[in-house]
Image (cartoon, helix red, strand yellow):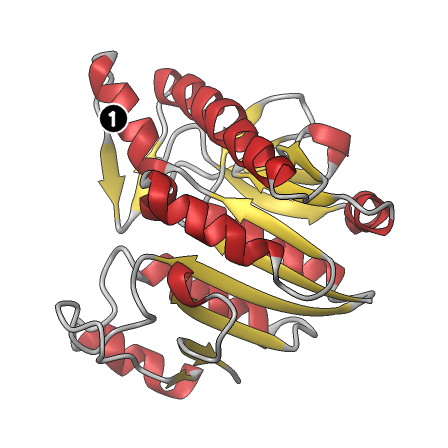
Amino acid sequence: MNITVIKIGGNVIDNDLALDDFLKDFTSVDGPKILVHGGGRIATRLAGELGVETHMVEGRRITSKPMLDIAVMVYAGLINKRIVARLQALGINAIGLCGADGHCITSRRRPAAPVDYGEVGDVVAVDNRSLLALVSAGMTPVICAITADTDGNLLNTNADTVATEVARSISQDVDTQLIYCFEKAGVLADINDDSSVIEHITPAVVDSLIDNGIIGAGMLPKVNNALGAVMSSDIKRVVIKSSRHLNDDSGTKISK
């Protein structure tokens, strides 16, 4: 079995036309697949409407208890079920999950130092048996970025990290590739020039890209997760690319 884990970013999810186009392309990805999604913009917009302030540090959301409630409603509810329904209409037998479902992703609350991110979880375990069982049964898991700790608390978790940990876990048993999709063509040398894709990133060059401001706060979690994926697992291929070009060879390849 070969499995493709694909993470789709919040900016695409917030655009109905872009999301529909992506999901159509997703259906044509060869073989079994798992979709992981975020949804930051919708959560931010709803938080504003409800009078809950949004705070970010280095591209990561500070999750207060009121913000956690919003994240659960938006990620595990609205966005997850919207994607599942659309995939069903496209002939994909999708099943929507958060980390608490089937005990598939266990996390723990991130320590308060050096930055207190609030109700944010770091993944400690992925039960790849439950995910592989669903895939073997012909279903396509659609996983949101809400996880649970061993005490039954829900926690907001970075979606790039969830995708990385899911791919890392299942790569222990099956051939796995990991694709991070978002609105840009890849990691760009010039954020305003979509043709300036950096075709290849390795640990040897990433520090200089960060120091020179090429990899900024919003891209940093993606690149760090991608590098972590290739350095500490058997994942065969890791790519950061545009959601519009899911099935071609474009984007930024990440390798050791």
Give the residue number, with chain letter if any, for mark 1: 45
Residue 236 percent location from the top left of the image? 65, 77
Image quadrant in which you'd find residue 6: bottom right
Q: Residue 109: horizontal and vertical position, in percent?
A: 52, 34
State the image quarter where residue 153 is shown.
Answer: top right
Toward the viewer: 9 or 56? 9
Q: Position of residue 253 (x, y in %)?
A: 46, 80
Image side of residue 222 versus residue 184, left or right:
right
Compared to 210, does 80 lie above or below?
above
**Residue 112: in sight, yes or no?**
yes
- Figure quadrant of the N terminus: bottom right
Where does the image place residue 175, in percent across and percent down from the top left?
75, 71
Q: Going by the picture, which residue comes out furthest to the top?
A: 50
Amino acid at dot 1: Arg
Apparent side of residue 140 relative to residue 113 in the rendered image (left or right): right
Per the image, label 1 sits on a secondary structure element best described as helix
Residue at 25% in and 78% down: 209
Q: Which residue shows up at 62% across the image and 63% down it? A: 29
User: Image point 47% across, 61% down: which residue?
Assistant: 180
Compared with residue 76, is residue 29 higher up or lower down, i.e. above or below? Answer: below
In the rendered structure, the answer to whether residue 96 lies left or right of residue 13 reads right
Along the viewing direction, whichever of 60 and 50 lies nearer the viewer: 50
Image height of 78 relative to 93, above or below: above
Which residue is located at x 71 percent, y 29 percent? 101
Q: Is residue 161 something one can see in this rendering? A: no
Count neighbours of disc 1 (C-alpha within 10 A) and say few if under 14, some if 14 to 19, many if 20 or more. Answer: few
